[in-house]
Image: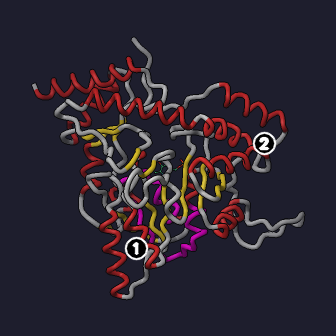
């Protein structure tokens, strides 16, 4: 019996051990510490943003981003429907309403044409614009944001990119060519949870080119504490800063980002090759105008029953595969949300399956995974 193949596990080496030891020995453990600043500086440089503020999770990053762009109770925030629930929850922390945007078939990301039409419709009718739009780069595939960005500028709407799954992905042609995800909206948010492209154990980053936004995010993340020794606070803030210990691991991982990204790309390319000829499998988006970051390699199967049969067969063979998240409109807290667009998110959610995608996934384990997918589909065909 071979070892179980996990969905996505981190890759650690001596770099992480050394920096972690340095952090522990330095005595700086919590959010005052030199490695937090170093992590922020190197992260900003790596993605091509002016400012980066490290925080305790990707969810906290999104919450801070919404607060910083001024989302108020009663505003509405438009969010991708096909995503992990943490993309939407922070809007509710702000007591804003969530409007969901259906996915598009090409990218699995929010349908930007629907959003553009909605913003124009509101402008014509003189209705309030959304407090913010949270566009998720789902599974590492960049969203097609160019036109939406222009319209957001025109109409004064704040675009927040949820790039939690997409660190290192970029646009390669069109108006956004050369830009990395997270850097084209007003604010971009990243996650360093254990299963993401890089990890700090747990953590997140807010990036922006606007100095006032960066300052506000940093202030809100540190209990809105004013400088000085007097414990003075000018608002209700949060304890959302990243610790120096976590920054040590995050910084070591960041320094290995090119290596980790190319390892994941190799995994994705191998899946493309091994599964490309399998009629019952639709490969994930990989569009000519973008370079994806290949977070969880996810395929579409013919129907929900086939998806479940393949998942169970993989599980029995010791391979961890997972359904893509249910669309948010089907999750209890979001059942009453309005939805822009149609049923695409429901369709992808019903048929999507994420396959093992760790950077260090061995070719033999990948072959084993693909063999189980193929033999199950052959068995189902009868
Ligand atoms: C992981 C994730 C988050 C939340 O990040 P945490 O660090 O786990 O809080 C938010 N949005 C998306 C799309 C994610 O995948």
Is residue 244 shown in magenta?
A: no
Magenta span: 63-92
Q: Quadrant of the N terminus?
A: top left
Q: Please say whether residue 139 is visible from this viewpoint.
A: no
Q: Is residue 136 above or below residue 67?
A: above
Farthest left residue in view: 382
Res 375 quadrant in image: top left
Is residue 87 shown in magenta?
A: yes
The residue depicted at 41 percent of the width and 38 percent of the height is: 296
* Residue 112 screen position, x and y as percent: 34, 64
Colour scheme employed for the rendering of this structure: secondary structure
Q: Is mark 1 within 8 Å of ligand 1?
A: no
* Residue 240 screen position, x and y as percent: 67, 55
The residue depicted at 52 percent of the width and 33 percent of the height is: 260
Q: Is residue 361 above or below residue 91?
A: above
Q: Regarding mark 2 in the picture, which secondary structure is present there?
A: loop
* Residue 200 screen position, x and y as percent: 63, 40
In the shown orientation, is residue 305 left or right of residue 359? left
* Residue 193 screen position, x and y as percent: 56, 42
Residue at image mark 1:
151
In the shown orientation, is residue 184 left or right of residue 202? left
Q: Is residue 155 above or below residue 238?
A: below
Q: Regarding mark 1 in the picture, which secondary structure is present there?
A: helix
Q: Residues within 10 Å of mark 2 (few under 14, many from 20)?
A: some
- Say which label, 1 or 2, has the lower sequence index: 2
**Mark 1 and mark 2: Cα distance apart in space:** 44 Å
The residue depicted at 59 percent of the width and 47 percent of the height is: 46
Res 344 quadrant in image: bottom left
For residue 29, the mark is: 2
Res 334 quadrant in image: bottom left
Farthest right residue in view: 229
């Amino acid at each position: 019996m071979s070892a179980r193949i996990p969905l996505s596990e981190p890759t650690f080496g001596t770099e992480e051990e050394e920096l972690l030891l340095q952090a522990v020995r330095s005595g700086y453990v919590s959010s005052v510490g030199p490695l937090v600043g170093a992590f922020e500086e190197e992260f900003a440089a790596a993605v091509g943003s002016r400012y980066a503020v490290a925080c305790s999770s990707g969810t906290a990053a999104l919450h801070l981003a919404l607060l910083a762009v001024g989302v108020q109770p009663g505003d509405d925030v438009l969010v991708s429907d096909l995503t992990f629930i943490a993309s939407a929850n922070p809007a509710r922390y702000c007591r804003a309403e969530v409007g969901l945007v259906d996915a598009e078939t090409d990218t699995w990301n929010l349908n930007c044409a629907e959003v553009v039409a909605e913003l124009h419709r509101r402008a014509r009718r003189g209705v309030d614009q959304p407090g913010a739009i949270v566009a998720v780069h789902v599974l590492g595939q960049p969203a097609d944001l160019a036109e939406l960005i222009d319209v957001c500028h025109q109409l004064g709407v704040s675009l927040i990119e949820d790039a939690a799954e997409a660190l290192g992905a970029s646009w390669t042609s069109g108006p956004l060519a050369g830009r990395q995800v997270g850097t084209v909206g007003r604010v971009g948010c990243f996650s360093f949870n254990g299963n993401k492209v890089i990890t700090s154990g747990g953590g997140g980053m807010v990036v922006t080119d606007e100095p006032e936004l960066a300052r506000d995010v940093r202030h809100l993340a540190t209990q809105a504490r004013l400088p000085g020794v007097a414990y003075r606070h000018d608002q209700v803030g949060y304890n959302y800063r990243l610790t120096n210990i976590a920054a040590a691991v995050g910084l070591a991982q960041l320094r290995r980002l090119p290596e980790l990204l190319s390892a994941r790309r190799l995994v994705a390319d191998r899946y493309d090759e091994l599964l490309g000829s399998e009629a019952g499998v639709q490969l994930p988006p990989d569009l000519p105008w973008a370079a994806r970051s290949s977070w969880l390699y996810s395929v579409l199967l013919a129907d929900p029953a086939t998806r479940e049969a393949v998942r169970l067969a993989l599980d029995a063979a010791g391979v961890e595969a997972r359904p893509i998240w249910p669309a948010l409109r089907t999750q209890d807290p979001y059942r009453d949300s309005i939805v822009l667009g149609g049923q695409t998110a429901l369709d992808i959610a019903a048929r999507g399956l994420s396959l093992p995608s760790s950077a260090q996934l061995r070719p033999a384990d990948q072959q084993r995974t693909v063999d189980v997918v193929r033999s199950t589909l052959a068995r189902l065909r009868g």
